[in-house]
Amino acid sequence: MAFRQIAVLLLLAFLLPLTGYSWGFFAHQRINRLAVYTLPPEMVGFYKKHIRYITENAVNPDRRRYAVAGEAPRHYIDLDVYGDSALYKMPRYWQQAVERYGEDTLMAHGIVPWHINRMKFQLTQAFKDRDLDRILRLSADMGHYIADACVPLHTTRNYNGQFTGQRGIHGFWESRLPELLSDNYDFFVGQARYIEQPQLKAWEIVASAHLALDSVLGFERELTMAFEEEKKYSYEVRGNLTTRVYSREFSEAYHRRLNGQVERQMRLAIHTVASYWFTAWVDAGQPNLRQLAPTVSAEEQERLRMELKEYEQGPHLPREEGETRLHRSTWISGRRE
């Protein structure tokens, strides 16, 4: 890759704390990488051999958001549009949810828990087929969606605080805090475990994230009232640009108020990612991974190059306030009217 392209990608990564709408390149890559080390002996050698692929391509689903129709809803679920008790009342299985709400409505407000389960079935089939390219691609992608499901702000239509005067909180929580403070996190999460009911597990991690949402928004609001504007933000030089970021003082104060919340959610993501990989492998009959092709194919390498090229040349617009996908006024009693 040319030096200029590398510089552009690094700059984009640096800017994510205030503009990113996912864990950010840093955290997604760290989650996927650390998940590898929780796998059992029969799997860890294979994944360690391909750890660079698993790590670097952890961000690919975010790159596709701007180029692939239908990609964006796979990263979140706006539970609050379905009512106060949606977390407990929504159907856990896709077909039942479609029957109740309709596919258009579900796609309009996010499908991450159902998509995780779909990815698990796809990865199981890839293991059965002994398809190295698909195993690696699906493993990297699945890690991304599972990590997104662990983020509280991925469970609400107020995903960036745009409805509560807290615009920018999304990147603050999931990018700025990990980048500043995660070197002190305890990422020893134990060995991956077999998941008996993958679809219900996906909802379990969504629930963990959603139940933390009030703290995410409430603590930031309280601290903002206590901080003067010039102390809440600071400026950092990144590349040749000076950009506004949340100050270290404000970040550390917010982190203390959250009492380990970001660390807990990252730990949950790491262990859950590895457990889904392990479950897919077991359900495929525990194939011998040492017998797979030694390297990714030329076709897969070309696919990755084209995907990166499309991302670099395309628009990188975040989901903004007022983006309706399905207009809010069409939501009546869970149906499109």
Image: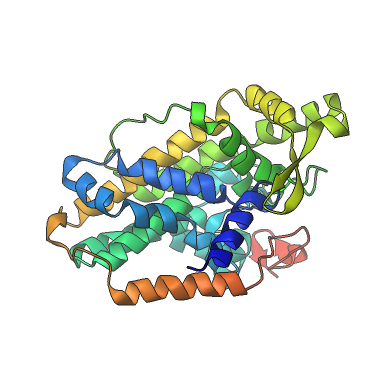
Residue 67, position as x, y percentages in the image: 57, 73
Which residue is more in the foreground, 197 or 260?
260
Residue 133 x %, y %: 29, 67
Going by the image, does 198 lie left or right of 68?
left
In screen coordinates, is 2 left or right of 314? left
Residue drawn at the location 58% of the way across and 38% of the way down: 179
Quarter of the view holding residue 252: top right
Q: Is residue 324 above or below residue 172?
A: below
Compared to residue 202, the image places residue 292 above or below, namely below
330 left or right of 10 in image: right
Q: Nearer the viewer, residue 332 or 203?
A: 203
Residue at 44% across / 55% down in the picture? 58
Residue 197 can be seen, yes or no: no
Q: Is residue 306 above or below residue 194?
A: below
Q: Quadrant of the C terminus?
A: bottom right
Q: Could you say which is closer to the camera, residue 298 or residue 74?
A: 298
Residue 231 percent coordinates (x, y): 82, 30
Q: Position of residue 26 (x, y in %)?
A: 52, 46
- How many marks overall? 0
Q: How is the image coloured?
A: rainbow
Q: Can you see residue 326?
A: yes
